C-alpha cells in the first residue's frame, strides 16, 4: 500500500559560487588563462578589457540618476532560474557592474622582472608539420607523415603500433586525393625513417630511448671513431653504460678508460626526451604565479598578470538592458540575468583568488623573512596550519592555494609548497627544517669523491657530524626526493 509521509531534515549545500571560488583558487596561472578563454567564448556577458576609472564613474553616475527609485535587492541571486521576472531588480544589477571587473594589484607603479616568464610557443606538432611540408617529398608521404606526427607522445616518441597508425591513415584517406591509394607498412616505415633523419630536433619520432640516443649520435658532428664506439656502446652495452661499469666497457670495446669517459660524456649530454632539445633555452621553465620584490626595505607581492586578461561585463548587453528594458521579453531578461550572474561570479572568483594568493604569500614571507633576507638560505620549519592561523583561513584553503603555484624572487623561483616543511631535532635541541636537511645532503654529495661516491650510510654519518641524526633509510628517502641516484650511478671517471 502506498503511503505519504511528511518529514523534516537538514542538509548542507555548497553554493555554485563557492564551488567556483574553490576550483579557480586551485589552478595555476596557465590553466586559469585557458579557463578564462573558454569562459569568454561561452558567456556573452563577459568581455576582455576593462574601462578606465573615469568611464566607470561616468557610467555609474548615469545609472544612479536613472534608477533613484529602484528597490534595493541583494547583489546576487544564487538560483535565478527559479525566480520570476518581477522579483529581479535589473537596475540594481547593472548599477553595480563597475564592481564586476577583475581588480588586479597592478605592477605599473613598480618595476619587476618578467624577462624569464616564458612566452607562448608553437606546439611540437605544428612545428614538425611545418618542417614536413617544407620537405621536397611526394604528397602521399606528407599525408602519411602528418599522421605519424600526430601519433607522437608529448615527449616526441613514436610509441604507437604501426598497424594502429595504418588503420587511422586508411580510415582518413576517404574523400582525399589518396582515396584510391593503398597504404602499407613499408610506406609508413619509410616516412618514419625520413622524419627521424631529416626533421629537427634529432631523436624525434624514436620508438624507444636507445633509438632516440642513437639517432642523436648519428646526426652529430663528433669524431668519426668516437661516434662509431658510441653507437656500438648504445647498441650492445647499454646496460653496462647505464650502471657505469666503466672497466667492463673498456675491456669489451678494447679501449682506455679515458675514451670510455669521452663516450659517457657524449651520451650524458644527449636528450632522453627528443622534443626538449628544440627548446634548450627553456628547458625546465616554470611560469611563476606570483612575484615578490623588496622595495624600500619591505617585501611587495604581485600577481603575474602576463597571461590573465582583465575582464568586465559586456557593454553591448548592458546597453541593451538600459536602453530597451521596457521592451525586453521575459526569456531575454532571464538569459541576461543567468549570464550576468555567471560572469560576475567568475570575475569575483578571480579577484578572490588574487587576494587569497597574495595574503598567503605575504604570510609566508613574514614567517620566512630570514630565508628571503639571506637569498634562499636558512628556511624555517613552517606548517600550513601556521599560515592558516595567521590569516584566519582553513588549512584546506592554504593547501589548495599553494599546490602547483610558484613564486618568483630575486634569487630564483620556488614552489609555494616548498616553504612548508616538518622539522628534525638536532643534538643541541634546536629544530632544523627537513628542506635544510635535503640541502645538506645535496651539498655532501656535490663535494664527495666522484670516483668513489658516498653510500647512504656514509652520508648519514656525515650528517651526524653536524648534529643531525637520521637513519640510512631516511637519507635514502630524502636523496630520492631531490632526484639524486644511488652511489653506483653517481660514479665518474676523473682525468688523471
Image (tube, rainbow, N blue to C red):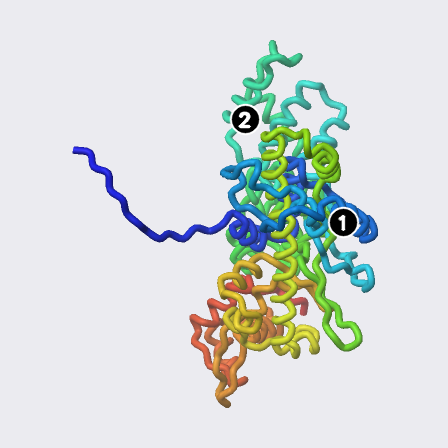
Where is residue 442? Give x, y as percent: 58, 71
Where does residue 379 sit, x and y in percent of width and height?
60, 76
Please name whichever residue, 107 or 178, is drawn nearer the observer in this view of the structure.
107
The residue labelled by disc 2 is: 165
* Circle 1: element type: helix
Quadrant (top left/top right/bottom left/bottom right) for the C terminus: bottom right
Residue most toward the top? 180
Identify residue for label 1. Answer: 60
The mark lying in front, picked from 2 and 1, is 1
Question: In this orientation, which residue lies closer to the viewer: 168 or 213?
Answer: 168
Around disc 2, counting alpha carbons within 10 Å, would you say few (fewer than 14), some (14 to 19), or many (20 or more)?
Answer: some
Query: Whole-percent x and y of residue 45?
Result: 67, 38
Residue found farthest to the front: 69
Name the quadrant containing residue 137: top right
- At horizontal 69% and vertical 34% (from top left) the residue drawn is 325
Q: Which tag, 2 or 1, sits closer to the chain's start?
A: 1
The answer to which of 160 and 256 lies nearer the viewer is 160
In the rendered image, the vertical position of residue 447 relative to residue 278, given as above or below: below
Tell me the residue at 61%/76% (across/down). 367
Q: Vertical placement of 23 versus 140: above or below? A: below
In the rendered view of the protein, which quadrant contains the N terminus? top left
User: Helix, strand, or loop for circle 2?
Assistant: helix
Amino acid at each position: 500500500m502506498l503511503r505519504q509521509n511528511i518529514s523534516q531534515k537538514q542538509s548542507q549545500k555548497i553554493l555554485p559560487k563557492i564551488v567556483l571560488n574553490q576550483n579557480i583558487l586551485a589552478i595555476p596561472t596557465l590553466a586559469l588563462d585557458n579557463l578564462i578563454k573558454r569562459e569568454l567564448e561561452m558567456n556573452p556577458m563577459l568581455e576582455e578589457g576593462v574601462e578606465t576609472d573615469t568611464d566607470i564613474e561616468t557610467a555609474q553616475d548615469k545609472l544612479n540618476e536613472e534608477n533613484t527609485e529602484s528597490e534595493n535587492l541583494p547583489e546576487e541571486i544564487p538560483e535565478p532560474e527559479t525566480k520570476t521576472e518581477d522579483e529581479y531588480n535589473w537596475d540594481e544589477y547593472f548599477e553595480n557592474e563597475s564592481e564586476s571587473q577583475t581588480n588586479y594589484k597592478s605592477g605599473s607603479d613598480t618595476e619587476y622582472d618578467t624577462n624569464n616568464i616564458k612566452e607562448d610557443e608553437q606546439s611540437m606538432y605544428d612545428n614538425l608539420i611545418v618542417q614536413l611540408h617544407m620537405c621536397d617529398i611526394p604528397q602521399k608521404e606528407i599525408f602519411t607523415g602528418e599522421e605519424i606526427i600526430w601519433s607522437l607522445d608529448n615527449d616526441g616518441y613514436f610509441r604507437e603500433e604501426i598497424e594502429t597508425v595504418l588503420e587511422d591513415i586508411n580510415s582518413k584517406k576517404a574523400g582525399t586525393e589518396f582515396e584510391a591509394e593503398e597504404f602499407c607498412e613499408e610506406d609508413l616505415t619509410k616516412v618514419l625513417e625520413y622524419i627521424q633523419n631529416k626533421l629537427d630536433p634529432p631523436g624525434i619520432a624514436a620508438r624507444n630511448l636507445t633509438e632516440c640516443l642513437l639517432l642523436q649520435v648519428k646526426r652529430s658532428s663528433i669524431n668519426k671513431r668516437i661516434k662509431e664506439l658510441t653507437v656500438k656502446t648504445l647498441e650492445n652495452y647499454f646496460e653496462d653504460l647505464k650502471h657505469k661499469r666503466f672497466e667492463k666497457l673498456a675491456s669489451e670495446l678494447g679501449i682506455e678508460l679515458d675514451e670510455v669517459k669521452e663516450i659517457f660524456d657524449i651520451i650524458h649530454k644527449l636528450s632522453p626526451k627528443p622534443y626538449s632539445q628544440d627548446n634548450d633555452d627553456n628547458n625546465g621553465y616554470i611560469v611563476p604565479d606570483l612575484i615578490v620584490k623588496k622595495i624600500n626595505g619591505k617585501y611587495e607581492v604581485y600577481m603575474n598578470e602576463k597571461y590573465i586578461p582583465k575582464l568586465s561585463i559586456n557593454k553591448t548587453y548592458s546597453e541593451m538592458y538600459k536602453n530597451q528594458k521596457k521592451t525586453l521579453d521575459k526569456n531575454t531578461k532571464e538569459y541576461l540575468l543567468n549570464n550576468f550572474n555567471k560572469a560576475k561570479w567568475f570575475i569575483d572568483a578571480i579577484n578572490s583568488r588574487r587576494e587569497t594568493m597574495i595574503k598567503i604569500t605575504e604570510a609566508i614571507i613574514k614567517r620566512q623573512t630570514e630565508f628571503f633576507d639571506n637569498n634562499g638560505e636558512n628556511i624555517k620549519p613552517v606548517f600550513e596550519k601556521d599560515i592558516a592561523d595567521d590569516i584566519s583561513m582553513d588549512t584546506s584553503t592554504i593547501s589548495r592555494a599553494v599546490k602547483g603555484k610558484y613564486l618568483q624572487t630575486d634569487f630564483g623561483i620556488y614552489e609555494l609548497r616548498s616553504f612548508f616543511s616538518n622539522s628534525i631535532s638536532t643534538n643541541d635541541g634546536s629544530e632544523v627544517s627537513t628542506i635544510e636537511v635535503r640541502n645538506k645532503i645535496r651539498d655532501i654529495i656535490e663535494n664527495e669523491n666522484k670516483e668513489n661516491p658516498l653510500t647512504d650510510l656514509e652520508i648519514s654519518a656525515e650528517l651526524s657530524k653536524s648534529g643531525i641524526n637520521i637513519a640510512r633509510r631516511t637519507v635514502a628517502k630524502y636523496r630520492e626526493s631531490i632526484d639524486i641516484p644511488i652511489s653506483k650511478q653517481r660514479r665518474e671517471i676523473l682525468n688523471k
